[in-house]
Amino acid sequence: MDILKKQFIEYADRFLVGDRNEDLMILLKRDHCLQVAEVALELMKSVTGDPRELLLAETAGLLHDIGRFIQYRKYRTFADAKSENHSVLSVGVIRELELLAGYTPVEQELICDSILCHNRPAIPEGLPERERLYAALLRDADKIDIYRVVLEYYENPSSIGTVTLDLPDTPEVSSEVVESLRAHHPVRMTALRTVSDFKLCQLAWIYDLNLPRSYHFFRERSYLERMCVQLPEFPERNPLVIQLRDFLASKL
């Protein structure tokens, strides 16, 4: 893992150009990948103590967004809809650089498949138990650390570059987004029209968590309360906040 992290950092640093504002986005994603690796490791520890499984989970977390660097440099955005699917880019980079050369073919496929699943609307049906575990674990780890990133931005807007997919920062919320939350459903990315929609979309992620330990991460870091504070006023706001609090409490 130490060798792989060194390779990862060296690769990410290739995209630094010496301009603070430009490099901030690269460093943001580099740190995110390192943090997701740590969260994935902790989540897997809640499932098993097998050293090989812990290594595989940490590896998937580290490499899940390695395609983001070339995405940003090429397209100037992290929005897949305006560029390319970043999970596909990530698997392409992994294979091009042979970053998983020290893993068995089965392990390589397991890691790459979990990466390809991490940004899909839902985990595909019919996956074998082990593949489903890795897909679920990586999706949870990614969401948990994205909360850290976006809350830092929402609470200190000048601290990092924009992470809100180039959406207009206005208080309007879309009816489709509100209805998705009411129904305990994840929000479609194509439904987002404003940063307020994006915040509601992120709150809806709580309905898409998979591992029991993931809910405890949300409680320990006060993610739900901190995100709710960021919401604008709109008619359905308070009922939705109560619904989210009750849901988290039921999971804990």
Image: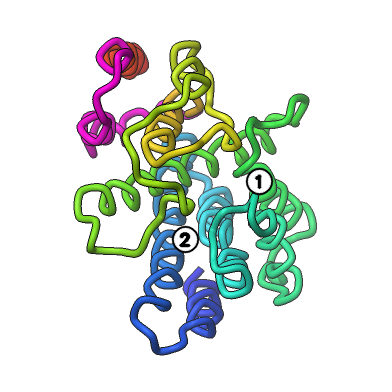
Please determine whether, in this image, residue 186 is positioned above or below residue 37.
above
Q: CA distance from mark 2 to mark 1?
A: 15 Å
Amino acid under label 2? Cys
Across and down, in percent, residue 137 comes to: 53, 39
Q: Which residues are magenta?
A: 210-239
Between 225 and 43, which is closer to the camera in this rendering?
Answer: 225
Please determine whether, in this image, residue 6 is positioned above or below residue 94.
below
Q: Quadrant of residue 136?
A: top right
Q: Main secondary structure of the magenta part?
A: helix
Between 104 and 6, which is closer to the camera in this rendering?
Answer: 6
Kind of element beneath mark 2: helix
Across and down, in percent, residue 132 comes to: 66, 33
Can residue 57 be seen here? yes
Checking the image for residue 156, the label placed there is none
Kind of element beneath mark 1: helix
Query: Is residue 170 shown left or right of residue 90?
Result: left
Between 81 and 135, which is closer to the camera in this rendering?
Answer: 81
Across and down, in percent, residue 41 comes to: 45, 50
Query: Of label 2 and label 1, which has the lower sequence position?
Result: 2
Across and down, in percent, residue 243 comes to: 33, 11
Residue receiving disc 2: 33
Residue 227 drawn in magenta: yes
Q: Residue at x 68, y 54 (%)?
A: 85
Q: Residue at x 40, y 28 (%)?
A: 173
Q: Residue at x 61, y 72 (%)?
A: 70
Residue receiving disc 1: 114
